[in-house]
Image: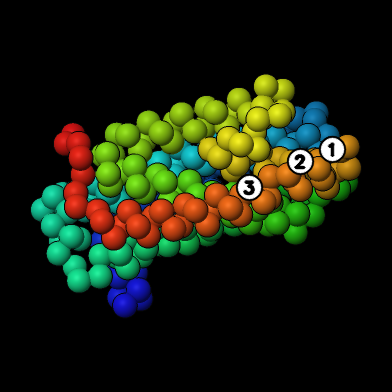
Amino acid sequence: MLRKHLHADILKMKGTPVILAHILIPIITSGVFLLYYSFSAWNDATKIMAFYQAVGAGFPVLIGIFCASVAAQEKKAGGFQNLLSLPHKTTAFWSKVFLLLLFGMFSILFTAILFGYGFCRTPGCSISIGLCITMALIMWCSSIPLYLWQMILAFQFGEGVSVCAGIVSSLVSALMLTGLGKFIWKFTVISWTARIPYTFLKLVFGEVGAYDELKAVLPLYAIFTVISMLYYFLWASYFEGCKLSE
């Protein structure tokens, strides 16, 4: 059943820029950073930290936009009637978020591979492409709760709310990368796509305290992700249409 819904959702997305965006954004992002790093005087550790900080902080707004696009597509198809009339609408909702997660994984890995390949070819580079791929997977895992909640916001309250939430999440993510987020970022879910990978990098580069930070946030991440999945399942089961008309 899930496979049929996935196939149907892929066909629906062919007429939208969602798939193309997941290909072009990694190319543009990695290209811009590689171009800048070709003449930047920063050391390798600073460069890779800055790259994943920027990608992690920008990720939430893209999630909001993509979830909004999916919701808008269903809304245009008879005000969600095609979706609500399905005998297994919960499976249909899981199909949508699962497909976006797959696209997100591809996009993040594609970005990491392009950036890692170009960055690691520079003379004297001390960073491996394996680290870039590991960072991408950590960032993707950190984004799972965001996909679930952004999908709920997009369908329940409208596309505009989802996009605005994504923008706010990105701004908060950037803020949590500063000293202001030193103690509270672990409890700020919307900052995890930026701060968890950044903290892992600090651990790799031997910064004191990074291990304790990761050790403290991982149980919170696991608990919140499970709660988010359970709530998404319940919400999808009782969803009856958008509360706001845009």
Q: Nearer the viewer, residue 197 or 229?
A: 229
Q: Which residue is mark 3?
A: 220
Q: Looking at the image, is 29 positioned above or below residue 85?
A: above
Q: Is residue 51 left or right of residue 223?
A: right
> Which mark is first along the chain, 3 or 1?
1
Q: Residue at x 47, y 52 (%)?
A: 228
Q: Position of residue 126 (x, y in %)?
A: 86, 48
Tell me which amino acid carries mark 2: Glu
Can you say which quadrant of the picture contains the C terminus? top left
Q: Which residue is mark 2?
A: 213
Q: Looking at the image, is 44 positioned above or below residue 175?
A: below
Neighbourhood count class around disc 2 (C-alpha, 10 Å): few under 14, some 14–19, many 20 upward: some
Tell me which amino acid carries mark 3: Leu
Q: Position of residue 183 (x, y in %)?
A: 71, 29
- Residue contact between numbered discs 2 and 1, judged by CB atoms under 8 Å: yes
Q: Position of residue 113 (x, y in %)?
A: 64, 56
Tell me which amino acid carries mark 1: Gly
> Which mark is first along the chain, 2 or 3?
2
- Residue contact between numbered discs 1 and 3, judged by CB atoms under 8 Å: no
Secondary structure at badge 3 equals helix
- Please state which of the two labelled residues, at mark 1 or mark 3, is closer to the viewer: 3
Q: Residue at x 10, y 53 (%)?
A: 78
Q: Looking at the image, is 180 positioned above or below residue 215?
A: above
Q: Which residue is mark 1?
A: 209
Q: Residue at x 60, y 25 (%)?
A: 175
